[in-house]
Image (cartoon, helix red, strand yellow):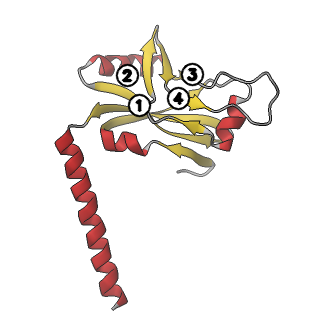
């Protein structure tokens, strides 16, 4: 991460279930106590996705827990949140998502100069054999590292 950014949460499941074609940084519209809850890290987005409705990008399935230290005027944890992108980016993403198999998935949430940002990925779902290949590759890499460490230690 560049200077002045702090990672809040990363969607590890998205990298396993999808192959990420490209990613876009976008802002997110939050209200009231949602910002404090996000900064506290009380978010959950395992099944979150974004869709384009009326030339606006909305993320759904993204849960921001209620802020513990607020009054009765708290936010709705499961409401759809609007993402902030330029018109040209939205048009390009709309063209890409109309192709078969592509979807928009939030990859990570982070703070950049005090503002909450989202990395939105244009993803294509992986088949079962692709996932198995990734697991095998990860295991081989881990074994190689283990052997390398053994040889260094003696």
Q: Position of residue 47 (x, y in %)?
A: 43, 31
* Disc 3: which residue: 81
Say few, some or many: other residues with alpha carbon within 10 Å of mark 2 (under 14 / 14 to 19 / 20 or more). Answer: many
| Alpha carbons under labels 1 and 3: distance apart | 13 Å
In the picture as drawn, the residue positioned furthest to the bottom comes out as 154
Answer yes or no: do the residues labelled 2 and 3 have beta carbons within 8 Å? no
Eye-nearest disc, 2 or 1 = 1
Which numbered dot is residue 62?
4
Q: Position of residue 149 (x, y in %)?
A: 34, 80
Residue 89 visible to the viewer: yes
Seen in the image, is 152 located left or right of residue 140?
right
**Local SS, label 1:** strand
Seen in the image, is 20 located left or right of residue 127?
right
Q: Earlier in the sequence, mark 1 or mark 4?
A: 4
* Disc 1: which residue: 105
Res 72 → quadrant = top right
């Amino acid at each position: 991460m560049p200077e002045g950014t702090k990672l809040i949460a990363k969607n590890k499941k998205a990298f396993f279930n999808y192959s990420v074609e490209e990613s876009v940084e976008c802002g997110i519209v939050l209200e009231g106590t949602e910002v404090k809850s996000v900064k506290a890290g009380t978010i959950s987005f395992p099944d979150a996705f974004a869709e384009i409705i009326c030339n606006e990008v909305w993320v759904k399935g993204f849960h921001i827990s209620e802020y513990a230290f607020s009054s009765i005027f708290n936010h709705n944890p499961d409401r759809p949140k609007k993402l902030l992108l330029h018109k040209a980016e939205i048009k390009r993403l709309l063209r890409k998502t109309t192709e078969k198999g592509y979807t928009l998935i939030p990859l990570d949430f982070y703070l950049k100069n005090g503002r909450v940002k989202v990395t939105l990925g244009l993803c294509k779902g992986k088949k079962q054999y692709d996932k198995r290949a990734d697991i095998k590759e990860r295991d081989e890499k881990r074994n190689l590292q283990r052997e390398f460490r053994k040889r260094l230690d003696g």
